[in-house]
Structure formats: structure tokens, C-alpha cells
Amino acid sequence: MIQEMRKEFMNAEKNVLAACEKAKEVQPKLNAVVTFIDPSEQLSHLEEHKDGLMAGVPIVLKDNVCTKGIRTTASSKILDNYIPVYDAFIVEKLRNAGAITIAKASLDELAMGGTNTTAYTGPVHNPWDITRMSGGSSGGSAVLVASGVVPFAIGSDTGDSVRKPASYCGVIGVKPTYGRISRYGIIPYSSSLDHVGYFTRNVEDACIGLEVLAGRDDRDMTTSTKEVPAFSKLLNSSLEGKKIGVIKNVIDSIKNQETVQIFNELIEKCKAQGAEIVDVTFDNNLMRAILPTYYMIANCEATANHSNLDGIRFGVQEPGESTEEVMIQSRTEGFGIQVRKRFITGSYGLFVENQEKLFRKAQRVRRLIVEEMKNALTSVDCLIAPASSSIAPKLEGEQMDELSEDYLIAENHMVMGNFSGYPSMTLPMGFSKECPLGVNITCRAFEEETMFNIAAGIEKCTGLKDIIAEVK
């Protein structure tokens, strides 16, 4: 789709304006946009970037990406009036590639959540069935790609915040290796877990996305100096000889047998294409520990990262009789209940007397989980499992037992990609009740070329490429 739009460069303005109109048309049903952006100024400079990899392509940014002169809320009331004075590094990269930003998309407040129901502007609805959730925290971006508004959208992934909504919305969600893409100008959640990610509707576009976004940025000292390959030119969909490791713990924990059946059918198709399939089993105690370990590390880091959201330096300020009262009132009124709960957890874990038994212990458990992954990936080219145990849950009336293995393992195993920093992506594998199901693959660090090639082979097996939901 990106390639086709580049070829239609002479019609770029028409395509961009059509995307703007479609975004406004579906907004009442999907509630995916926080801020619409007039593309006129960007279009006036488009000729300067006509040779870019995304020349004339309309895109969307998650609303935790700083945009100079354009409101950036992170879907939190406390940032409702925040207008950055600078652009995030990826905004510069996308602009230089010729992309045209048409909107800022909704997210779970401050990217803390997996449902996109906690945004202060209200929940985002799934385009395949508007009674269902989009997944989060990058749900707005996923929905706008899935509904055909744009072919590319930026998200961020701290636990599975790109890859889970990709599964629920029937699109491709990519979380590259930690350090591939600069996070300069991204409102942080958890510094050791945050990744910039993105959505497309086919694997070739996913390759182009990383070519545009990746590269060293001295303003983010975690970024890599590794060369960025021309992934789209190197794409090879052959699965012949590829060794694929099925995470047995995840399969065994899924209660929904239709999901398991669709996954097993995909695995058989991969075998028919020449792939070697092996079962990989992790320590089940470590798998059960993924979610609590994530909560402790992420929330401790988030508490530190967001201590500056006090209503004094910037953001929405609530009245008070003293500076302390202003801060208390601003944070109380400015944050939703879920975010406040996470800050309480993080603060507790950061108390001096608790750091060793909580925060440091979580870091040690994280290291053990990463060692398991590292060992498993020495003998296979990728790890694979369903991205979720089911289709997107209903916005009302459906709740999972959060102590069950179906939840602890099947719904949270993709966090391992954040613990390790390894490249990981989700793509469609089938449908149930006319809603999509996704499959997730994870490879060794900086082996995105292998990941994209295996994904292309899976895409060939499923035939689920460039699918668009009809919003009803």
C-alpha cells in the first residue's frame, strides 16, 4: 500500500485529503482520534521529499509523540493543554521520508494499559465490531490502520501495546529491537521497556517502516549505531529450512480451543512450506511471573518518569492555597484512577525499605526470563505463539480471571519481548466470529530481516494481507 501511494505521488494531495475525510467519517463510531491535523502546510513542502520512502503517504501518530506546535496529550487530562516546542526524532524522520501526518491517535492514559478504555476522551472501538475493545495502549493507531484510514501509524510498545491491538484489529504490529528507533520526544512510560513501534497492513510496508524510522540519534543514548538494512529489498517469503519454535507454555494455557485450532492449522501450513517446527518449553514459574515482574518494573519507572507532571512546570493546573496543594489537586484531578493505582504501586516499590525485596527482585526475575529466551533462540530462528487467547473482548461484560494461566501466560507472554528487547511482531492468522486473531513471532536481537522474512512466509500461508475492516 505504501509503495502504491508513492507511485501515485501526483495524486498525493487527493489521497491525503481523502484520508482526512475518512478519519472524520469513522470518528463518531471509533473514537480513535484525539487531534485532527490540517495537512496543508505539510503538503506545501511535499515536493522537497518526493523521493522519500513514504512520499505523499498519510499517516497517524500516537498522541504520546511530541509534535511541535500541535497538542500532545498522551490521552491524559493533565496534558490536555500541552503543546510541545519540539518534534520527536521520529517525526523528523517521517517528514523527511515524505509522510503526511493527519491526526494524533488515542491511547490508554500515559500508555498505561492494554485496552484503550482509559483515555480521558473515552474508549476506542474495534472497527471489526464496535462493541469490542481495540486493545492498547496503541489502540487508536491500530484502529485507524485497520479501518483503512491510513496505511501506516506510529505506536509505542512497553508490554505488548503495539502487538496486542494489532492482533485484535487484524493488522501488523511491529516492535523492533530495543535501540533500533530513537525514543527522543516520546512521552515515556518505562524507560527500560519502552519501544517505538508501528502498524501496517502488510509485511512489505512493515519493512519500509523500519527503514524510515531506524538509525542512531545522539539525543537518545540507547539508540544503536548498527547499519539499517534495506529490509524491503531483502524480503524473502520462503520458509524452507526455517526453524520455528512454538512456545508450548502458551498453547497449553489457552482455554479457547478455536484459537488453538487456527494456530495449529497455520503451523501445518508452515510445515508444508518447508519450515521445521519444534516445541519450546520455558520454566512455567517464570512464565507466571511475567506479569507481576512487569508491573513492578514498569510502574516504578513510570512513577519516576512522571514526577514532573505536577501542574507547576507544565500541564493543566488546578487551584490551591499553596504550591503543595496545587500539585496534589493537579495530580488528583489530572490522572485517571488506573494511572493513580500504578503510581501507588510504583511509589511503594521505590521506598528505600522495599527496593531490594520488590524492585530489585523484579529486575533479577526479568534477567532469568531473558536468559530462558536467549537459550531458546540459540536453536531456533524464531519463537511463535498466538498473540492472544481470543478475539478482542467486549467493552462491556467480559472479564478474565487475572490469576488464571489463560491470563497470566497466554495474554502476557509478549512482555518477554520488552524484557529482552528482542524484535517481535504480530500479524493476522485467522478469524473467529468475524473478528481477527493474531500470531506473534520473536527473533534474536537485531535480526529483523529474519523476522520479516518469516512473517512474509506466514502472510503467504494465511493470505491475510491488506485486509480492511468495514466500520458498521
Image: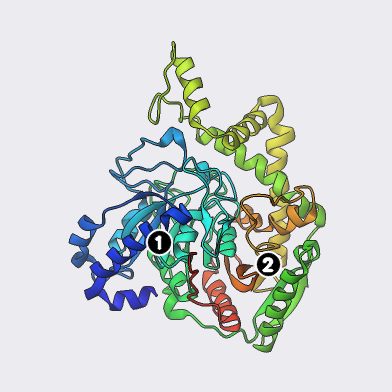
Residue drawn at the location 63% of the way across and 72% of the way down: 431
Q: Quadrant of residue 257?
A: bottom right
Seen as rendered, the residue at the extreme top is 321
Residue positioned 32% across, 61% down in the render:
21
How is the protein colored in the picture?
rainbow
Instruction: In this rendered view, identify the residue nearer to me: 50 or 335.
Output: 335
Between residue 466 and residue 96, name the one nearer to us.
466
Amino acid type, mark 1: Leu
**SS assignment at label 1:** helix
Q: Is residue 107 above or below residue 311?
A: below
Task: Tell me which residue sits at (27%, 77%) in the image.
Answer: 8
Q: Quadrant of the N terminus?
A: bottom left
Q: Position of residue 142 (x, y in %)?
A: 49, 60
- Point out the tag, 2 or 1, that comes first from the N-terminus: 1
Decide: is 163 above or below 466: above
Say what amino acid the circle numbered 2 marks. Answer: Pro
Circle 2 packing at 10 Å, graded few (<14), some (14-19), many (20+), is many
Horizontally, residue 190 falls left or right of residue 210, namely right
Quarter of the image holding residue 213?
bottom left
Residue 271: which disc? none
Report the Cα–Cα distance between label 2 and label 1: 27 Å
* Residue assigned mark 1: 213
> In the shown orientation, is residue 59 left or right of residue 388?
left
Tell me: residue 34, above or below residue 446: above
Residue at image mark 2: 386
Give residue 141's position: percent from left, percent from top.
Answer: 46, 57
Q: Position of residue 83 (x, y in %)?
A: 33, 39
